[in-house]
Structure formats: structure tokens, C-alpha cells
Amino acid sequence: MLCYDCAQQGKDVDTIGICILCGRGICKEHSVREDLPVMKGEYDVELECGMGVECSTKDMQHLPQMLCPTCHKVVKENY
Ligand SMILES: [Zn+2]
Ligand SMILES: [Zn+2]
């Protein structure tokens, strides 16, 4: 998968993870690792699947907890 934010800038960069909130691919540069003490049930987790990709929150559990810059901003603003 390619980093969504890099793609916006016309760059093809492989992802190292997936945003736990929106499901976008994020590269090392764009990933934000954050302890989120209010994650449990506080947010609507809606994964943007499709494009032939089947996924669920269950599938996401083994992934590192990462946020894309957009979701990180939203989370910070809602603290
Ligand atoms: Zn990127
Ligand atoms: Zn996100």
C-alpha cells in the first residue's frame, strides 16, 4: 500500500502501517505514534475499506497503534 499523504504530494512511498482511525496507509514519515488513553469506545472507528480489500477492526489489532496526520490533529483537538 502507498502512503496516502505522500500520494497527495505526488510521491509513491510504501506504508509501514495503517491509521487506526481512518484506515489510510501511512509511511514512516507521516505516521504518528501516540498513546491514546481515551480510545476505548470514545471514537467511531470506521475503516475505509473497499477497493477489493476486506478488513475489520479485528484484523487491525495486530498492527501498531498509528495515526495519520489528519486523524492525529482531530484527536488532539478533541482531548
Ligand atoms: Zn507519507
Ligand atoms: Zn487517519
Image (tube, grey):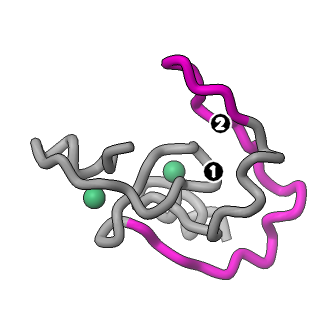
Q: Quadrant of residue 7?
A: top left
Mark 2 crowd level (few <14, some 14–19, many ≥20, 10 Å Cα): some
Q: Which residue is at the front of the view, 11 or 35?
A: 11
List the residue tagged with mark 1. 21
Q: Is residue 8 left or right of residue 77?
A: left
Instruction: Tell whether circle 1 marks a residue whose Cβ is less than 8 angstroms from ligand 2.
Output: yes
Q: Which residues are magenta?
A: 31-55
Residue shown at 20%/41% (left/top)?
8
Vertical relation: 74 (above or below) 1: below
Vertical relation: 10 (above or below) 70: above
How would you classify the magenta stretch by its main secondary structure? loop
Q: Is residue 55 left or right of residue 22?
A: right
Query: At label 2, which amino acid type do we have?
Result: Leu
Q: Quadrant of residue 45?
A: top right
First along the sequence among labels 1 and 2: 1
List the residue tagged with mark 2. 47
Residue shown at 56%/70% (left/top)?
76
Q: Position of residue 25 (x, y in %)?
A: 44, 49
* Label 2 SS: loop
